[in-house]
Image (tube, rainbow, N blue to C red):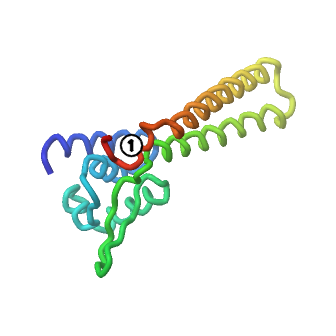
Amino acid sequence: MDEATAQFSDRMGQIFENEGEPRTAGRIFGFLLVSEGVVSLNHLAEALGVSKASASTNARALAQMGILERVSRPGDRHDYYRVTLDLFARTMTRRLQRWERFTEAVRDARRTIPSQSPGVRARLKAYETGWTYMMEAMGQALEKWNRAPQRKQVATGSSR
C-alpha cells in the first residue's frame, strides 16, 4: 500500500476510534473507500497488517452497519468486500436513526423523571427542541438528496 493510502486508512481508523468504533474497522473502511472494485479478506488483512480474524470480524461488523457489502464470486469461496454503493444515504440514515433514539430518550426523561426543577425541565426541553429541529432539517435534506440526479451518480459510482 502506498504511503498516502496508509495515512488515509490510519486517519479513518482514528476517526472511528474517536467515535467509539474499533480502529481496525475504520482502517478497513478507509482502505476500501479508496480501493477500486472488491477486495478479498486476505488482501485486506495483508495490506493493513492485521490478522485475518480481525479483518473478518471488523469487515462483518461494517457490513452489518450497512457501510460495506460482502460480495461473492461464483466458484470462489473467499470473502470479498467493497464500500456499499449507496454509502452516503445509508450512513446519513443511520446517523439520523441514532439522533432519533437520543432525542426520544431526552423526551422520555423530560416527561417521566419526577420532581425536576424548572431549570432541568427547561434544559431538557431546549435540548429536545434543538435535536428535533436538526433531525427534521437533516431528514428533509436527505430526502432532497435522494431525489437529486447527482445522488444516482454517487450511489452507483459513475461519473456521468
What residue is shown at x 32% (from left), y 41% (from top)? 160
Judging depth in this view, the residue of 18 and 7 nearest the camera is 7
Residue 119, above or below 158: above
What residue is shown at x 20% (from left), y 44% (from top)? 5
Judging depth in this view, the residue of 89 and 12 nearest the camera is 89
Judging depth in this view, the residue of 49 and 60 nearest the camera is 60
Residue 36, above or below 144: below
Left or right of 60 on screen, residue 117: right
Residue 4 placed where, x, y %?
A: 17, 40
Residue 26 placed where, x, y %?
A: 35, 48
**Number of numbered markers:** 1
From this viewpoint, which residue is outermost toward the right?
115
What residue is shown at x 37% (from left), y 39% (from top)? 15
Name the kind of residue labelled 1 in the image: Gln
Sort mark 1 into few (<14), some (14-19) or many (20+) by Cα contacts within 10 Å: some
From this viewpoint, which residue is outermost toward the left?
2
Left or right of 4 on screen, residue 31: right
Mark 1 secondary-structure assignment? helix
What residue is shown at x 27% (from left), y 57% (from top)? 37
Residue 8 placed where, x, y %?
A: 25, 41
Judging depth in this view, the residue of 136 and 12 nearest the camera is 136
Q: Quadrant of residue 104?
A: top right
Please give the residue where the numbered disc 1 appears in the rendered image.
153
